[in-house]
Structure formats: C-alpha cells, structure tokens
Image (cartoon, rainbow, N blue to C red):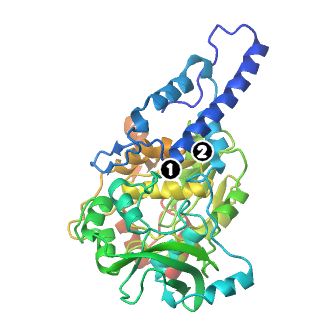
Amino acid sequence: MQSNYVAFGKGRTRARGFSLLMRGILASAVVLIAVGVVMQLEHGILSAPAVSRSGVQNMGVVRGKAFASSPMRRSVAHFATSPIMRGISLSAVAAELKSIPHGGKLTDLMLSDKSEIDSLLSTTDMDFPLNDRQLCDTELIINGGFSPLNGFLNEEEYNSVVEKMRLTDGTLLGLPVVLDTNDETIKPGMKLKLMQGDKPIAVMEVESKYVPDKVRECKQDYGVTTLEHPGVLMVSTERGKYYLGGKLTGVALPDRVFPCKTPAEVRATLPPGKDVVAFQCRNPVHRAHYELFTRALDAENVGEGGVVLVHPTCGPTQADDIPGIVRYKTYEVLKEEKSDPRIFWEYLPYSMHMAGPREAIQHMIIRKNYGCTHFIIGRDMAGSKSSLTGDDFYGAYDAQDFAKSNAPELGMQTVPSLNLVHTIEEGYVTADYAKDNNLTVDKLSGTKFRQMLRAGEEIPEWFAFKSVVDVLRANV
C-alpha cells in the first residue's frame, strides 16, 4: 500500500523557513482545489464510470465526459503527486472535507414545532402503515442519512438510478430508495401519513405512482434475477405492485429498542479534523472483526489520531441473520467491556439488500453523511449465496474494487480489510504472514460456531468474546 506521505523537497529547497512557508501555502491550495473538485463531482459535472471484476458496471457518464479520464482529473492527480506537493497528507485533505455531506448539504426534513406538525397532519388524506424496511428508509430520508434525497424516488429518478446508478442530476446513488404499495386508491396529489403503528413518522406528498420493471431493477441492482438471491426475493415477493415517489416531511423519529442517532448528532460526537474510519457489519462482532477495525487505524492512508466508527445495521437483513435487537445487545456489552476512546459505537436503521458492489456504494454514501472519511471494505461485502447451491453471487473482491473506483468521486478513502487468521504461535496475523512463517492456524467455521453455541459447548476465546457469547446464548 502506498503511503499518504512522501518526501518533501529532496535536496533542492533553499532554506528551511522558506520551505515551511511554501508547504503551508501549498497545503491550503490543495485543500481548495480538492474542495472545488469534490463540489463539481457532487453536482454531477464530473463522474467516473467503473467496472468491477464481476462486470458490475457504473454507467454514469454525466455531461459527456468521465472524470476518471478527464484532463481535470489528470491535472489534479499530477499536481497532487508532483515534487512541490510532497509531504502534504491526502488524509488531512479528506478530514477537511469531512463536513461536506453527499450532494453538498446534510438534509434535515424534520419539523420541530408542534403546531406546525399538527397543522400538517390535519391535511393528510390517509394513513400509510410502514413495514420494517419502509420504516428504515423513511427514517434515513428524514434524518439526512440518505442526503441529498428529500423523498422517495419518482419514476424518472428511479429509472436513472437503476440504469446509471445516478440521480438525474448526476449525483451518485448505489440503489434506488422507493416506497412500494398494492393500494389502488392512492393517487398523485394525495398526502399520506406514514405510520409506525399508531405513531405518525412523516407526511408524503405523492408526486408519482408507477409500475416498476422489477426484472430490470433486479438485474441492474443485484446482477441477477434469480429468486435464489435474497434481494431479488425481497423485491419480487415482498414489495407491492406500485412504487410511490414524492417529498417527505418528518414529524417524529421511530421508536426503537436500540438508539439511532441522526447524522448531525453523530457528527457532533466525532473529533474535529481527524480521520473517521467506518466499520459496517450486520453480525455480532467477534475477535477477528475487532482486530480488523482496530488495526485499520494503522493503515497508511489513515492520519494520526484517527478513530473508528463501528456502525452496524440493525434493520432487516437476511432471513437467517441474528435479529437486530440481539445484535445490539452484543455490541453494547462489547462497547462497555473495551471502553476504547478510539472506537465510537452508533447504530444505523438500514435495511440490507445484499447487493454486493452497488450496496457498498450505498453504505459509503450513508457513512459519508454520518461524518466518516474512510470506509473499511471487507471481502465479499454485502454479498450473499444462492439459497439452492450455496455459490457466491459476487467475487470476493468485487465490492472492494467497485468501492475503490468510486471513492474519489465520493470524497472518501477505502481501507481494504486484512485477511486475518488466528495462530497458535502469534495470535492474529495476516494469512500471508502465517503462510510465509509456517504458523499453525486455528480454524472454526461459522456453521460450526453456531452448532457449538446451540449445544452449549465452550467457544474458544480466540474466536469470540465471552461477553458476546453469553448474550447470544441468552437470546438466540
């Protein structure tokens, strides 16, 4: 991995004082240039088409020229790596850009004045009960997690995201965010009161109602159309016949057993000017996970004083995953046990699609809105296996490659996950190190772990934290 830091002024600087002065001036210049590039990217002026190893393609070429090969990108890249720029940290630039959410502004659609809320609710035409997935999407729209979205996608925006992975203005979006229904009575122009049980969450102004091409959606989003894929199964059998598009106004956040702070609230807790490395997970954190995200702070593109934001999804995932409330309890006991000031723990009300590469982009966008500068990309992130054959739908590194190719446009950096193994001789090391040094690798599959858990057998502590195992045994 190439270091963020390179030698400055090899042998030709005239005086140390002048060198330091010029370094400061040029550091400011590169921040301004980077901000300008990112702002152009955010407004769709520039874009970067990319193809992963599995052929998953980002088709978004906006205004006739791809940023990936444009003269501007080549000029910026040349300037950033030229001799006069040596010594300036790219991660420091990323930290300066941390406060710029996706699209340039953090969306906040929440009303706080009770009289305004009551007045708005009185204008609605009907109640619309939200299921768990719809509730997660609604919350992330109104709290800014899906910035720059201000509502569910209309047909034009939906088709643009499905085909190009972009909104019509060119803004990158990994997956379409839609509200489905089978209700024949809903018409454009109506106002819907989106409900969590008997609690109003938001008001939607229905702008469009359309019949989506679900086969096309699944092929583009998931790469396949077979019902063996959990995302395809969800779109095909759980979602209704129609999609609704329109703006939202939030009147309350959902009631949850696990606390989900808004992006603005999470940003307020993070250290200013420091790199923030996001770790996404949908399972309990075991020893290998912990080693992975703590060692990420030592990555060469993470600046000094960086922190990790462990940001698990606690919404619906795959049918055989551990329930969100149980996962939340495992995170809480581990957070208390470790009490590491470098590690922040927050929870995300997100519904997993298991869409592999395109979902990796969705996660990066969300974590960018929550204030992160870096994102850990694991092997086969958001991947899934065939329910019939057990074969993987995506290659092990497809999500990593796709995320890395889109990271410059998003203004984030990726941190590839290390392939760690536990050895008898030296504990956790990389698999390559273990092989090169003929170390004895301990092995325990996830299937075997679950069998041992159900049978009440002792779980080796090199594999899982005892506190986490105790929670799982008490709740699963």
Residue 199 image-quadrant placement: bottom right
Determine which of the numbered discs, if any, sits on residue 147 in the image: none
- Residue ranking furthest to the right: 17
168 relative to 386 in the view: left or right: right
Q: Please report the residue visible at 62 percent of the width from the left and 70 percent of the height from the top.
A: 109
Residue at (39%, 67%) from the top-left corner?
353
Residue at 29 percent across and 65 percent down: it is: 218
Residue placed under numbered mark 1 in the picture: 376
Query: Which residue is label 2 attached to?
Result: 297
Q: What's the amino acid at mark 2?
A: Leu
Which residue is at the front of the view, 374 or 467? Answer: 374
Q: Badge 1: few (under 14), some or many (20 or more) residues near its Cα, within 10 Å? A: many
> In the rendered structure, which amino acid carries the disc numbered 1?
Ile
Tell me the SS state at disc 1.
strand
Q: Most extreme residue toward the front, as rendered?
A: 189
**Residue 413, percent from left and from top:** 53, 43
192 or 346: nearer the viewer: 192
* On screen, residue 158 above or below 134: above
Mark 1 and mark 2 lie on one chain; the one further toward the N terminus is 2
Q: Is residue 323 visible?
A: no
The picture places residue 157, in percent across and down from the top left corner, at: 41, 62
Report the residue at 64% width, 80% height from top: 251
- Say left or right for 339 vs 221: right
Residue 170 percent coordinates (x, y)? 45, 51
* Residue sitting nearer the eye, 390 or 470: 390
